[in-house]
Image (spheres, helix red, strand yellow):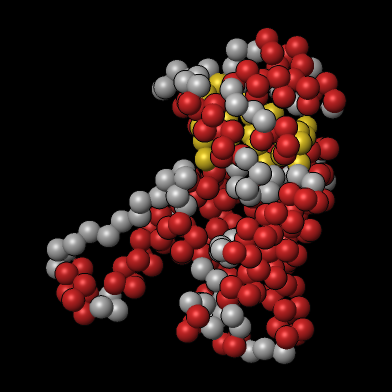
Amino acid sequence: MLYHTAKDWMQNQHKRVMLFGMSGLGKTHVSNILRAGGDWFHYSVDYRIGTRYMGEHIVDNFKAEAMRNPFLADLLRSDSIYIGSNITFENLSPLSSYMGKPGNPELGGIPFAEYQRRQEQHRSAEIAALLDTVTFIDRADRLYDYANFICDSGGSICEVVKPEDQDDPVLKALSDNLLMVWIKGGEDHAEELAHRFDLAPKPMYFGKDFLRSLWAEYTGENNLLEAEIDPDDFMRWANRKTLAHRLPIYRAMAENWGVSVAADDIARVKTTDDFDALIASALVAN
């Protein structure tokens, strides 16, 4: 690891960290606290995916929808209007809207084949955005004179790495340049996250083989054709399966490549000093 002891961490003037774990446990919240402190560069993997690697796909999807309207179609053809994506660190809705949900088109679903195609685009984009972290560490220091660097990863990082492989290219590049920190939630956190998701199901990325198994299980259990599937119902069901699926992968990432901190402790972080102390304690425990 980049820092082997609490002393290494506390005395280092160039701290570099990547937070990973389930979406909703505080990665972006803590990253915003550190950025507000003035001496931390905040690199959001999801933002990078939605701008650098998926931006054109997102805007093309907007344009395809606009072309369904004759009035807007004429304006687009004559370059009279501009359609763009206003994606931010806090608002990733443009990326979510492009990813979509599979199922009945009358309920907002898209064909499963198209869903798989967009999932593969996201996989390539996520790997590229994760590897870009190393470049941005240099840019943050060289161009913007930030001493410290926080990488705010997406919840699906565990779907594009193999933590048991010592030569995994993504994990090796990350661990060589940052301290990887798992925000570990308990069963109560998982239930709360599932409940929140049930209220507002969102698009998400699944590993290819895992997605195929989910789709086969769901359609088989419910005896439904693709066009009969309620997209939100599928996403609610798949999300609960995904929470259980990802937990051991996160754990292996922490055990083989980094350290872990409790979600409850992350929630108590209010300042950069709080964060420094928490990471130091994690290194002691490791």
Residue 239 visible in the shown view: yes
Q: Position of residue 208 (x, y in %)?
A: 67, 65
Residue drawn 76% across and 78% down? 217
Check the image and report above or below for 282 versus 273: below
Residue drawn 38% across and 58% down? 56
Q: Position of residue 12 (x, y in %)?
A: 65, 13
Q: Nearer the viewer, residue 244 or 169?
A: 244
Which of the 4 quarters of the picture holds residue 286?
top right
Check the image and report above or below for 101 versus 183: below
Residue drawn 63% across and 58% down? 196
Check the image and report above or below for 191 versus 268: below
Q: Is residue 228 left or right of residue 190?
A: left
Q: Position of residue 179 (x, y in %)?
A: 69, 29
Q: How many marks?
A: 0
Residue drawn 69% across and 76% down? 215
Q: Nearer the viewer, residue 219 or 189?
A: 189
Q: Nearer the viewer, residue 221 or 255?
A: 221
Check the image and report above or below for 4 versus 245: above
Q: Position of residue 173 (x, y in %)?
A: 66, 35
Q: Is residue 197 left or right of residue 77?
A: right
Q: Is residue 84 left or right of residue 273?
A: left
